[in-house]
Structure formats: structure tokens, C-alpha cells
Image (tube, rainbow, N blue to C red):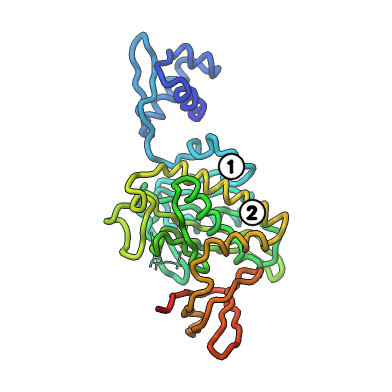
């Protein structure tokens, strides 16, 4: 109902009498008053003037589920949202929900994380109301070995969404970093629950710096706000991201990984460069040649041998 009230108030942009709203939405005046109070408690500025009615003055910058699903227009990604003011990590909550049978497409969102995590025990800084911290549950019918492609699909989706919403040209550093002007704006963490030949579910964690100022960023990081010089609506960014993920996920399901990998190549910062990769406690140096259909990086070493690397940390050699 909150969603409907907001939509109606938004649409009319002017004072609407309690009577008019109640009639339109088929609720009692008392019920309407209660919902308006709840919206005010959530931070919506709604003024009530005797004889004129209610008017929506401003909305808080929050990723409330009803704000995100309003005009989202996806079929299943993000249709169900578990929203929290803060969490230890959205990954923990999503993994637990996955074990409890949560359907694919559901997302866990937090306004901040106390222990946001990256790969290999590293941490993800998640200051309150600044970024987007989300974990998406998927139940793909693929083999566990094919799961890295989901990380690439997510990276492509982030780049496409940033271009669309903010006109920003982002690039992907294999396997999971999204950079703008060589600084990290987003990171992806893919975890799965699988048996030898069957994926039960996958959780894709995405951290994206949106309205962080310099103080809330580490030096090698950037945010959309820093790049654009202005704040951006996190709701709009998130909605476009979810739409892009769904489109790319359908492509992956219908046609396999080739098309996603072709898209990925358009955004890559890694391919063609001479790189060092930390991989299984070793350092491998060579030319980043390509990625194969399962998302592994192919490095041509100086000996001419091609080594396939399924995960690791890449640094460009100067
Ligand atoms: C990642 O790991 O880049 C994956 C990050 C995934 C975060 C999301 S947020 C929602 C979900 N819930 C979670 O708990 N996690 C996921 P990795 O490649 O290991 O990079 C981690 C490194 O990135 C750190 O060691 C820092 O150097 C850097 N870093 C940390 N916070 C950052 C930030 N906010 N922006 C840019 N870089 C950051």
C-alpha cells in the first residue's frame, strides 16, 4: 500500500485530499493516515495542510524494497527484496536464505555492512547509505565449473548500467573488478552451494560505490559521485543494474556464454596487456591473451606456453 500511496502522490505532484486518496486506493481515511505516518517515520517528507490535503515534498535516499520494485519491470531478478538497515554481510544472509530454499532472483540489500567481504578473506568497505551492497541468489542449471561466467556476466551488467544511467565508461579488470579511470568502483564476489556435478544455488555479491565522497573511499577506489561531481540516485542505478543482469542472464541461459564473453571483451582492461597474476601462491607473468568459454584467463608466458587461470589477482606490468 505504501508503494501505491507514493505512486499516487508522485503522479499528481500537488495536494491531494485524504478523501481523494482513500477513494482512489480503496482504503479508509484512518488506514491512509496510518500509512502516511509510517512513510514519515521512514523519512518521507509529506506535508498535510487542512482543506488541501497531502503533498509529497521529498523522498529519503534509501533502497526500500517498494522503491526498488516500483517501475523495475524485471521478470524475476529483484522482484523479491530482503532489505536491511545493516548486516554483517549480505553474503551470509543470502547464503542462509539459499539453503532455506529461497527462489532464484531474490536479492538481499543492506544500507551498510559491518563485515562486508571480498575474496580470500579481504574486506569490502560498506559505509552507510553511500553504496549499493547486494547479494543476488540464482539457481542456474549449469555445472559448477561454469559458474565463473556469472561473475563476468555481472561485471558486464555493471558496466552497461553505469553507461546507461550515468554515461560513465567503466572497464573490467579480470575477474571481478570494475574500474573507472583505473580506480575501483565495484567488486563482485561469487559464492556457490554445489555438489560435484550440480549447482544448488549461486550468490553473486556486488558492492558498488555510488555517493561516497573522498573520506569514505580508500585511495585506489572511486565512486560515481566522484566521477560525476554530483550525487546519483542509488535506486535508479540499482534498478538499471538489476535489469541488465536479467537481460544478460537470459542471454546466458538461451545462448550459452559466448555472447556474454564477447560483450565482456568490449569492456576489458586486462586483455592484451602484460600482466602478473597471483594464482595459487605462485606468480605468473605474461601476456593476457583471451578468456575461454568458462571465464578462465589465458596467459601466454614468455616460454610461449599458454596457461589457463581460473581465478587470481591481476596486476598490469609497466
Ligand atoms: C571484491 O573482492 O572486490 C568483491 C567485493 C564484493 C563486495 C560485495 S558487497 C555485497 C556483498 N556482501 C559482501 O560481504 N560482499 C559482497 P576483492 O577482489 O577481494 O577486493 C577486495 C579489495 O578491494 C580490498 O582488499 C580493498 O583493497 C578493495 N576495497 C575494499 N573496499 C572497497 C570499496 N568500497 N571500493 C573499492 N575498493 C575496495
Report the image quarter containing ligand 1: bottom left
Is residue 72 or residue 318 the one in the foreground? 318
Q: Nearer the viewer, mark 2 or mark 1?
A: 2
Q: Residue at x 51, y 26 (%)?
A: 4
Q: Quadrant of the C terminus?
A: bottom left
Find numbered disc 2 in the image and state the secondary structure of the residue it sits on: helix
- Numbered badge on residue 279: none
The part of the image, by quadrant, that contains residue 126 is bottom left
Residue under label 1: 79
Q: Residue at x 55, y 47 (%)?
A: 242
- Count of residue discs: 2
- Numbered badge on residue 249: 2
Residues packed near mark 1 inside 10 Å, few (<14), some (14 to 19) or many (20 plus): some
Asked whether mark 2 lies closer than 8 Å to ligand 1, one says: no
Q: Residue furthest bottom?
A: 303
For marks 2 and 1, give the CA distance. Answer: 15 Å
Amino acid at each position: 500500500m505504501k508503494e501505491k500511496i507514493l505512486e499516487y502522490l508522485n503522479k499528481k505532484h500537488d495536494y491531494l485530499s485524504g478523501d481523494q486518496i482513500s477513494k482512489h486506493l480503496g482504503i479508509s481515511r484512518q488506514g491512509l493516515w496510518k500509512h502516511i505516518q509510517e512513510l514519515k517515520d521512514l523519512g518521507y517528507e509529506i506535508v498535510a495542510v487542512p482543506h488541501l490535503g497531502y503533498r509529497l515534498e521529498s523522498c529519503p535516499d534509501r533502497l526500500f524494497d517498494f522503491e526498488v520494485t516500483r517501475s523495475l519491470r524485471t521478470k524475476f531478478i529483484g522482484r523479491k527484496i530482503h532489505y536491511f538497515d545493516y548486516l554483517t554481510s549480505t553474503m551470509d544472509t543470502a547464503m542462509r536464505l539459499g539453503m532455506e530454499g529461497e527462489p532464484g532472483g531474490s536479492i538481499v540489500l543492506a544500507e551498510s555492512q559491518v563485515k562486508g567481504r571480498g575474496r580470500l578473506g579481504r574486506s569490502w568497505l560498506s559505509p552507510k547509505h553511500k553504496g549499493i551492497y547486494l547479494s543476488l541468489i540464482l539457481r542456474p542449471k549449469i555445472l559448477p565449473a561454469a559458474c565463473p561466467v556469472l561473475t563476468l556476466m555481472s561485471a558486464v551488467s555493471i558496466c552497461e548500467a553505469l553507461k546507461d544511467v550515468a554515461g560513465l565508461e567503466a572497464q573490467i579488470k579480470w575477474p571481478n573488478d570494475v574500474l573507472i579511470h583505473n580506480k575501483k568502483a565495484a567488486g563482485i564476489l561469487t559464492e556457490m552451494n554445489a555438489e560435484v556435478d550440480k549447482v544448488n544455488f549461486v550468490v553473486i555479491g556486488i558492492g558498488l560505490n555510488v555517493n561516497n565522497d573522498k573520506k569514505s573511499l580508500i585511495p585506489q577506489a572511486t565512486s560515481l559521485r566522484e566521477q560525476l561531481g554530483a550525487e546519483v540516485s542509488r535506486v535508479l542505478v540499482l534498478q538499471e543494474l538489476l535489469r541488465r543482469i536479467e537481460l544478460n542472464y537470459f542471454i546466458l541461459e538461451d545462448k550459452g556464454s559466448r555472447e556474454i564473453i564477447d560483450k565482456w571483451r568490449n569492456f576489458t582492461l586486462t586483455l592484451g596487456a602484460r600482466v602478473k597474476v597471483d594464482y595459487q601462491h605462485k606468480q605468473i607473468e605474461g601476456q593476457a591473451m583471451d578468456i575461454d568459454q568458462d571465464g578462465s584467463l589465458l596467459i601466454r608466458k614468455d616460454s610461449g606456453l599458454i596457461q589457463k587461470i581460473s581465478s587470481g589477482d591481476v596486476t598490469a606490468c609497466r
